[in-house]
Image (cartoon, helix red, strand yellow):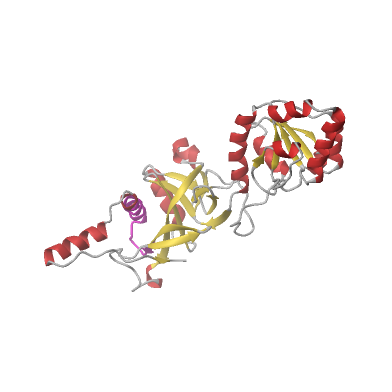
Amino acid sequence: MNRIPSSDAVNGVAFTVADFLEAGRERLQLELVAGKGNVGMTIEEPVVNRPGLALTGFFENFAWQRVQMLGNAEFAYLKSLTPEERMIRYELLLAHQAKIFVCTAGHVPPKDAIDAVEKAGGVILTSALMTRVFARHATFILEALGAPRTSLYGTMCEVCGLGVLFEGDPGLGKSETALGLIKRGSALIADDLTCVRKDVATNLLFGSASDSTAGYMEIRGIGIMHVPSVFGINAVRGEKRLQLVITFKRLQDIRGEVDRIGQTRRTREILGVEIPNVIIPVSEGRDLVNLVETAAQQQKLILAGYDPVSDLSNRLHRRAGRPTVERKKGKRNG
C-alpha cells in the first residue's frame, strides 16, 4: 500500500486495523474473527506484543498500544484456568485498554471472550501461522505501514545500481532524461511523483511510485507510455534505496554559483536523512543523460571510499612540497 500523505509524515503514518488486515491477508493469513465494525481504529504503535505477564495479572509497563499476540503459550496458560478465571484475565486486558488481538497457530478465543472484546470496541484477528513466523512477518508489515514517508515532485531511476532522484522546475527534462537512461540500461522507479519512505531501523530512505502510476511515464509530445510494455519488465523497479538527488537548474539561474571542481559536498535533507545532492546546470546542447550517468558513477566511487578531489589536491600539494589538505565540510542545499 503506497499512500501519499497530505504533508510530510516525519514521525510515521497513521494506519488502521483494516489497513493491517488488507496488507497481511495473504502473507500473514489473517482473518477477522470479531469486531468488524471496529476495524477503523488506529494502531497506536506498529509493533506486536505478547501479553504473557499481563495475563498473570502484572500490568506494570504494559504496552496496550500495540497489537496483542496470543500464541500457543498464552492459550495453554488460559486453558489451565477455570472458565471464570479465564474470563477475568480477558476482562483485565480490556480494562487496561488492550483492544487489538491476533491469535496465532489457528487459535480462536471462546465465545464469551469474543463477545467481551466486541462489547469493549475491540478487534480479534486469527492466523494459521506459528507464533514465531507470524511475529517475524508482522514486524515487517507493521513497520512498512507506519514508516515515516513523504512525496516528492521528481523522477527516480536506478542508475548504475544507485537509486537517483531528479528534481527541478517543470520543463527541464527530467522525464526525457529518465527515458534516455532507460534506453541505456537503467530502470524507472517513479515518474513525476516519487513516494519516499524511511526505514527507521536503518535510517535509510526508499523510493517508489504510487500504486496508480507505477510503470507509467509522461513524455511531452508523445504522451503517456507504459515503460515495461515498450522496453520490457527489466526497465522498471518496484522500490529502490535513495542514494543520490540530482537537481536540475537553468544555467542562467545559477551562473557564478557552480562549484566547478566539486570541492564542496552538498546534501539534501529528506525525512531527517542527509542525501548527497548534485546540482547540474541545464542549457541547450548539454547531454543530461550522460551527465546523470556520470554523476551516479562518481557517487559510487565516493561511497567506495575514493575521493577524486582530495586525491588530486594531495597530489598537487605533494609536488609543491606542502602538507596535504582535507576536503571542506559540505553545506546543505535545500
Residue 27 seen in the figure: no
Q: Residue at x 59, y 59 (%)?
A: 8
Q: Nearer the viewer, residue 277 or 218?
A: 277
| Residue 246 in picture, x, y percent from top left | 41, 58
In the depicted structure, whether residue 264 falls above or below residue 65? below
Would you say residue 310 sits in the magenta stretch? Answer: no
Q: Is residue 50 left or right of residue 248?
A: right
Quadrant of the snapshot with the N terminus: top right
Residue nearest the viewer, comparing 192 with 148: 148
Residue 249 sits above or below residue 231 on the image: below
Estimate the x, y position of residue 209 in percent, counting from the top left: 54, 47
Residue drawn at x 39%, y 63% as measured from the top left? 266
Question: Residue at the location (83% across, 28% down)?
Answer: 110
From the top left corner, tell me how far across and down residue 133 is, in percent.
Answer: 60, 30
**Front in this rendered view, residue 36 or 289:** 36
Residue 331, visible in the rendered structure = yes
Q: Residue at x 36, y 56 (%)?
A: 288
Q: How many marks?
A: 0
The image quadrant of residue 121 is top right
Stretch of the chain drawn in magenta:
279-299
Q: Residue furthest bottom?
A: 256
* The quarter of the displayed image where residue 256 is located: bottom left
Q: Is residue 242 above or below residue 76?
A: below
Task: Give yes or no for residue 288 being in the magenta stretch.
Answer: yes
Q: Is residue 240 left or right of residue 289?
A: right
Residue 76, image x, y percentages: 73, 26
- Report the front residue among 50 and 255: 50
